[in-house]
Image (cartoon, grey):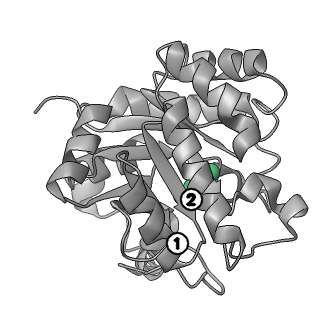
Amino acid sequence: QPRVRIHHLKQMKERGERWAMLTTYDMYTAAVFEEAGIPVLLIGDSAANNVFGYETSLPVTVDELLPLVRAVSRTAKRSLVLADLPFGSYQGSTEQCFHTAVRFMKEGGAHAVKLEGGSEMVPQVTKLTSSGIPVMAHIGFTPQAEHQLGGYRVQGRGEAADALVELAQEMEQAGAFALLLEMIPGEVAQRITSSVKIPTVGIGAGSECDAQVLVWQDMAGLRTGKLPRFVKQYADMRTVLLEAASAYMDDVRSGQFPGPEHTF
Ligand code: KIV
Ligand code: NA
């Protein structure tokens, strides 16, 4: 099967075919999700809290994310590999943004990048797309701006809805190939989705987006504690792994493992 390209995603929107995106940070998950037919694999800056153990996505660096992007792009034969630009690596200027995105494309092997922000990011989106780098614009709740936004709060409510629809259109005009809509009312996501020709990918943005995304450890049930309302857990991998590790440990302690069949 040929590589998924940005025009395929646009065609799926035209045909009314929905698709799913997942985060991926390593070769096994990349291989499994590609086999499942997931067309876009995101190396999110959520690796900060899902791989590296930080409390937020803010501390993760380009140098930390690059090897994960490389692992996924080496593995994925068909899926489009999308890399997040981490906090502080693109907001400074269009030149800084260009330099970071080029590192993700050249060193990481990414096919596209994602960045967060409002109208102030339009020059960045224009610069990248005019340089041959496809960009997904992440709008609505943007976790890198958590402290500016006052925590994890739904964006685009009430009066703010019109501005968000306008921003979506601005990003489309700047050349973004898709929009990521995070934590906005379903009704606003629906307005945005019908007012742009590029696909919308929702997370906590209702059912009317062209696509959906989840962090894979949330989707597969590795995460503990209270889950955000927008997460649906499709497996209980934490229990599966816990039971496997415990059974292995018990076997070792009781002398059941290794058996004769494992011994040279
Ligand atoms: O970093 C991330 O995982 C994201 C999401 C929207 C899934 O940006
Ligand atoms: Na992200």
Check the image and report above or below for 100 versus 62.
above
* Within-10-Å neighbours for mark 2: few <14, some 14–19, many 20+: many
Expressed as whole percent of the image width and height from the top left, the position of residue 175 reads: 49, 30
Does residue 198 appear left or right of residue 138 in this picture?
left
| Camera sees residue 264 | no
Confirm or reject: label 2 Cβ below 8 Å from ligand 1.
Answer: no
The answer to the question of whether label 1 and label 2 lie on touching residues, with beta carbons closer than 8 A, is yes
Does residue 55 appear left or right of residue 117 in this picture?
right
The residue under the point 35% across, 78% down is 234
Count of numbered tags: 2
Q: Which residue is mark 1?
A: 188
Check the image and report above or below for 23 versus 220.
above
Q: Which residue is mark 2?
A: 165
Depth check: give the residue in front, 77 or 204.
Answer: 204
The residue under the point 34% across, 33% down is 75
Query: Judging from the image, what secondary structure is the residue with disc 1 in?
Result: helix
Expressed as whole percent of the image width and height from the top left, the position of residue 88 reads: 82, 36
Does residue 144 appear left or right of residue 127 in this picture?
right
Check the image and report above or below for 213 versus 90.
below
Query: Judging from the image, what secondary structure is the residue with disc 2 in?
Result: helix
The residue under the point 69% across, 26% down is 123
Amino acid marked by disc 2: Val
Expressed as whole percent of the image width and height from the top left, the position of residue 149 reads: 84, 65
Depth check: give the residue in front, 243 or 29.
Answer: 29
Depth check: give the residue in front, 124 or 190.
Answer: 190
